[in-house]
């Protein structure tokens, strides 16, 4: 069972990263930022690369005017010992350029579960359709991959967006 769970975590990591990219390119910056925050959960097991996740988080948080979140993400990309410093050289002047005219403070308050995920690595359940945190709402859990979808996001969906199992293979529940 652990190997199967690990495989689904890897699939979920790529799914959420691709979802965040799609949201970014569709101009849904705040959604891309929140989905990118979900992606940080997968860094501890090296399922995703730090530079991919934090670069997308930096861009989407800056574009959605969450400057404090952007600043936190920038700090996570400081050169890591043993890595090629040439890769990080362009990033050294980035905080100055970004915050020359903006203070690194979020214009709106980010819900606590996103903040805790960024600051402490605390995990949260996210909808595989939208990437939104599932908090105090009705969701369904896929019986195959065990990941969640917000009921209101399903809109006639016939299959799980992660494993593509039929939505008949789901269990309804209320997630707190």
Image: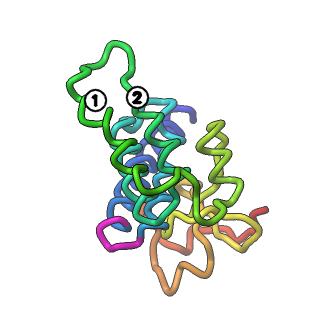
- 156 relative position to 88: left or right: right
Badge 2 crowding class, 10 Å Cα cut-off, few under 14, some 14 to 19, many 20 or more, is: some
- What main secondary structure does the magenta stretch of the protein show? loop
Q: Is 25 part of what is drawn in magenta?
A: yes
x and y, in percent, of residue 62 in the image: 43, 58
The residue indicated by pointer 1 is: 88
Q: Quadrant of the N terminus?
A: top right
x and y, in percent, of residue 54 in the image: 41, 43
**Residue situated in front as seen by the camera: 27 or 175:** 27
Instruction: Report whether residue 121 is seen.
Output: yes
Q: Residue at x 53, y 79 (%)?
A: 154
Magenta span: 24-28
Residue farthest top in this picture: 82
The residue indicated by pointer 2 is: 78
x and y, in percent, of residue 72 in the image: 52, 42
Q: Residue at x 28, y 29 (%)?
A: 88
Q: Residue at x 34, y 37 (%)?
A: 51
Specify the quadrant of the image occupied by residue 134. Answer: bottom right
Query: Is residue 87 positioned above or below 15 on the image?
Result: above
**Residue situated in front as seen by the camera: 111 or 42:** 111
Report, in whole angstroms, how far the alpha carbon at label 2 lies from the one at label 1. 7 Å
Q: Is 10 part of what is drawn in magenta?
A: no
State the colouring used for the structure image.
rainbow
Query: Is residue 162 positioned above or below 26 on the image?
Result: above
**Residue situated in front as seen by the camera: 85 or 118:** 85
Instruction: Report whether residue 142 is seen.
Output: no
- 33 relative position to 143: left or right: left
């Amino acid at each position: 069972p652990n190997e199967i769970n690990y495989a689904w975590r890897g699939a979920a990591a790529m799914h959420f990263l691709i979802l965040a990219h799609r949201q970014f390119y569709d101009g849904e910056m705040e959604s891309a930022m929140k989905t990118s925050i979900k992606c940080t959960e997968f860094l501890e097991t090296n399922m995703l690369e730090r530079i991919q996740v934090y670069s997308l988080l930096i861009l989407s948080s800056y574009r959605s005017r969450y400057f404090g979140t952007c600043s936190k993400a920038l700090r996570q990309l400081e050169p890591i010992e043993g890595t090629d410093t040439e890769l990080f050289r362009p990033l050294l002047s980035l905080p100055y350029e970004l915050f020359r005219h903006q203070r690194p403070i979020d214009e709106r308050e980010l819900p606590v579960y996103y903040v805790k995920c960024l600051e402490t690595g605390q995990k949260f359940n996210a909808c595989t359709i939208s990437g939104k945190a599932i908090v105090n709402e009705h969701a369904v859990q896929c019986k195959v991959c065990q990941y969640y979808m917000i009921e209101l996001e399903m809109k006639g969906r016939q299959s799980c967006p992660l494993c593509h199992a039929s939505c008949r293979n789901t269990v309804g529940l209320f997630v707190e």
